[in-house]
Image: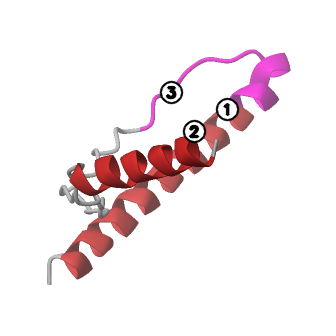
Amino acid sequence: MKKAILALLSFSIFFVGCSQKEPKTIFEDKLVCTEQQKLDKKEPVKIRVHNDDLIVAKAYKEDMDSSLQFYEKQVDRNNELCKEVNK
């Protein structure tokens, strides 16, 4: 029994010593920058809305305006970050 365990240990040490060891792969984050541009705002469009739907139309317009402002801030923030990284 002792001879079998000793033989297994010697073979495992032999084969481990002969194996090729690969270098560890290290991934580094790299920021990819692109210049983003804002779209030109179109002139306001006049539409005819029933009085019952006026509140809904105003809420929709405010939501669209806030979404547009959010994305414009994102474009500004991204462009500033890219300028800092490329320095």
Residue 47 on the magenta span: yes
Label drawn at residue 64:
2
- Which residue is at 55% across, 21% downward? 47
User: Mark 1 highlights which residue?
Assistant: 60
Q: Regarding mark 3 in the picture, which secondary structure is present there?
A: loop
Relative placement, left or right, of 31 versus 54 is: left
Residues tagged 3 and 2 counted as in contact (Cβ below 8 A): no
Circle 3 packing at 10 Å, graded few (<14), some (14-19), many (20+), is: few
User: Mark 3 highlights which residue?
Assistant: 46
Circle 1 packing at 10 Å, graded few (<14), some (14-19), many (20+), is: few
- Which residue is at 14% across, 84% downward? 87
Report, in whole angstroms, how far the alpha carbon at label 3 lies from the one at label 2: 15 Å
Task: Please name the amino acid that badge 2 sits on.
Answer: Met
Q: Which residues are magenta?
A: 44-57
The foreground one among 47 and 33 is 33
Q: Regarding mark 1 in the picture, which secondary structure is present there?
A: helix
Task: Please name the amino acid that badge 1 sits on.
Answer: Tyr
Q: Which residue is the extreme one toward the bottom? A: 87
- Which residue is at 62% across, 36% downward? 61
